[in-house]
């Protein structure tokens, strides 16, 4: 092999190494599970759960989450407004995150509510449950409406570290 060929091979290998290092930076820094739970802002409430599954991936300054929170009984009703607790890490202190619900089963909406949404506020480690309305601001889900003992919510979201 000539010296010129050797240098070309070294450049090719360096380019491949640079490419692999760039790909490695895109891999998740961490991933795992977390435990979901419902909570009222006044009285937390006591629930019997049939599913408390949460999964997360930290990726390039973001946390991607998926979860399910399902109950079969409410022995102590919650008061205040409702949240889903247990996020694996707190949200960035400056920006909020968002959650969308893929399955909403046996959920008692406020009259005239159009949709259930979730917000992860800056520096928070929970999901605020919110209802949206036509031509009006959202409201946090009142715990007084959280009465169905078969509520099952499945969701996905994203927030900044």
Image: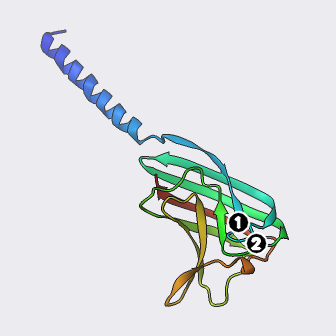
Q: Residues within 10 Å of mark 1 (few under 14, many from 20)?
A: many
Q: Quadrant of residue 139?
A: bottom right
Q: Residues within 10 Å of mark 2 (few under 14, many from 20)?
A: many
Q: Which residue is mark 1?
A: 39
Left or right of 139, for residue 71: right
The residue lying furthest to the front in this view is 42
Is residue 65 depicted above or below 105 in this figure?
A: above
The residue lying furthest to the top in this view is 1
Q: Are marks 2 and 1 in contact (CB under 8 Å)?
A: yes
Front-most of residues 10 and 27: 27
The residue lying furthest to the left in this view is 4
Disc tally is 2
Q: Which residue is mark 2?
A: 78
Left or right of 114, for residue 20: left
SS at badge 2? loop
- Among numbered discs 2 and 1, the one appearing first in the sequence: 1
Residue 114 image offset from top left, x and y in percent: 59, 84
Residue at left offset 14%, top offset 11%: 3
Question: What is the CA distance from the residue labelled 2 to the residue labelled 1?
Answer: 7 Å
Front-most of residues 96 and 151: 96
Front-most of residues 103 and 86: 86
Quadrant containing the N terminus is top left
Is residue 7 depicted above or below 39 in this figure?
A: above
Residue 127 image offset from top left, x and y in percent: 59, 64
Residue 80 image offset from top left, x and y in percent: 69, 75
Residue 152: give its label: none
Is residue 124 depicted above or below 8 in this figure?
A: below
Is residue 42 depicted above or below 89 in this figure?
A: below
Q: Quadrant of residue 2?
A: top left
């Amino acid at each position: 092999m000539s010296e010129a060929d050797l240098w070309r091979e070294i450049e090719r290998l360096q380019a491949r190494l640079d490419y692999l290092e760039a790909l490695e930076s895109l891999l998740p820094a961490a991933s795992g599970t977390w435990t979901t739970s419902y909570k009222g802002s006044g009285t937390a409430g006591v629930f019997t759960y049939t599913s408390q599954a949460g999964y997360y991936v930290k990726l390039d300054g973001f946390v991607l989450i998926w979860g399910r929170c399902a109950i079969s009984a409410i022995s102590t009703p919650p008061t205040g407004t409702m949240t889903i607790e247990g996020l694996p890490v707190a949200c960035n202190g400056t920006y909020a995150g968002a959650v969308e619900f893929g399955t909403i089963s046996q959920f008692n909406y406020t009259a005239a509510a159009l949709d259930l949404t979730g917000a992860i506020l800056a520096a928070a480690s929970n999901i605020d449950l919110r209802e949206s309305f036509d031509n009006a601001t959202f409201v946090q889900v009142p715990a007084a409406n959280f009465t169905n003992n078969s509520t099952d919510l499945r969701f996905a979201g994203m927030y900044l570290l």
